[in-house]
Amino acid sequence: MSETHLPPRLPRRALRALSEFFRLEAAGGIVLICAAVLALIAANSPLRDAYEAFRAIPVQLRIGPLDIDKPLLLWINDGLMAVFFLLVALEIKREALSGQLAERSQLVLPMVCASAGVIVPALLFFALNRGDATAMRGWAVPTATDIAFALGVLALLGSRVPVAMKLLLSTIAVVDDLIAILIIAFFYSHGLSATALIWAAVALAAMWLLNRRGVTALAPYLALGAVLWVCVLKSGVHATLAGVATGLLIPHVDKRNAIDDETEHSPLETLEHALHPWVAYAILPLFAFVNAGLALGGIQLQDMLDPLPMGVVLGLVVGKPIGIVGAALLMRALGWARFPSGMDLRAMFGLGLMCGIGFTMSLFIASLAYQDPSRYDEAVLGILGASLLSALIGYFWLRAVLPARGGQGSHE
């Protein structure tokens, strides 16, 4: 029987890195929440016209025949979010090669829980919207978990929260992100350009060759990544996937020369550490600010009961905990995994509620799914409502069931 928990003794460097990661993500989550609140204030105050004008600022980049002309909103969603996805890819690769996803015993529970936490919300959304083809374009909206937002809420609980719970939540969110990347690639690409895709393949091949030849300087990878972003932007595949591809091709562990040892960071770790504060404190809050500005005037409580927003709410608030906790119970019953150290069924349910905070990735998928502003606003209404409900219910539930001194909850 495998057990998903922290090893009894982690290397000092790993413990420091883990502690810094959780502090950074938690603080970033609080900034993210503040940015969303500011967006709602701006969109529902005399600042609304200025807010809309800010989102619509035209930004043009022209170099010879290359012409990219988009409003600021799309530069943020297509450009800066590519940096976010670059960071996500770096985290996924590091976890897969040398982290919690490297060992099968550590992978089984979060992998199965994350998969169930995607499938059940999608099914609930489908059940409410199956008769509306336009609404069904957003079936993936309630499938994501916002790690920064969730860890920001957990930070409010202080030492009550076992480290193993933060680790499991983070790992589930990483797997969630990987699934979301695949969903975006397969379901939200359109109007493909063969020429742009060929040039994108050339850029990918060049990065792969650099990796194979042992090049560890970051500059050529980032330069090729910028070229790849332009090619993918023009190809019909969503531009953020260029960030994913670039991150996966940046070198990490080299078993021949141990570049990722105690004294030398790999290029991947160096870039990950450099990007983390920019993503946490600038890119994600800016994304939240320009995308969460829902005008609430005229919206009534019964609007939340419309199939699209209700599908998002049920998917995140109900589907996430049902999928995650149900999968964890099944794994335990089959003898394939146990609950993490310091967590019982009540704590696992609280973790499932926290995973219902979709926010960043949910907003991003909604922006891809709905070109009609009214449908997008419905999705945003559901996302904001669901994330707030999940955060509040999860916070008060965990506050009630976790020991006041956070240490070791009972096993079950």
Image (cartoon, rainbow, N blue to C red):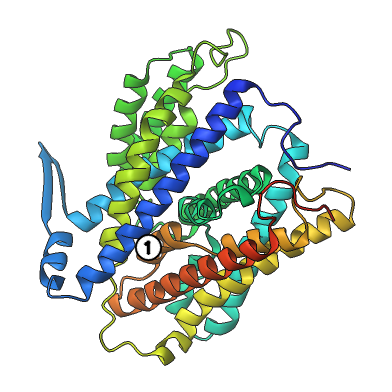
- Look at the image and tell me whether residue 67 can be seen: yes
| Residue at position x 57%, y 70% in the image | 393
**Residue at x 26%, y 77% (from the top left corner):** 295
Query: Quarter-wise, where is residue 297 in the image?
Result: bottom left
Above or below for 1 versus 334: above
What's the residue type where badge 1 is placed?
A: Leu
Residue 77 appears in the rendering:
no
Residue 185, position in %: x, y?
47, 52
Q: Nearer the viewer, residue 224 or 12?
A: 12
Task: Identify the residue at horizontal 61%, vertical 21% (top origin).
Answer: 12
- From the image, which quarter does the N terminus lie in? top right
Give 115 or 301, whichever is nearer the viewer: 301
Left or right side of 193 for 349: right
- Return the x and y of residue 271 as percentages of the image width and height: 40, 27
Residue for badge 1: 368
Q: Position of residue 122 (x, y in %)?
A: 58, 70
Quadrant containing the C terminus is bottom right
Against 81, residue 319 (above or below) is below
Q: Sort mark 1 into few (<14), some (14-19) or many (20+) by Cα contacts within 10 Å.
A: some
For the point 44% across and 20% down, the residue is 267
Name the foreground residue: 17 vs 214: 17
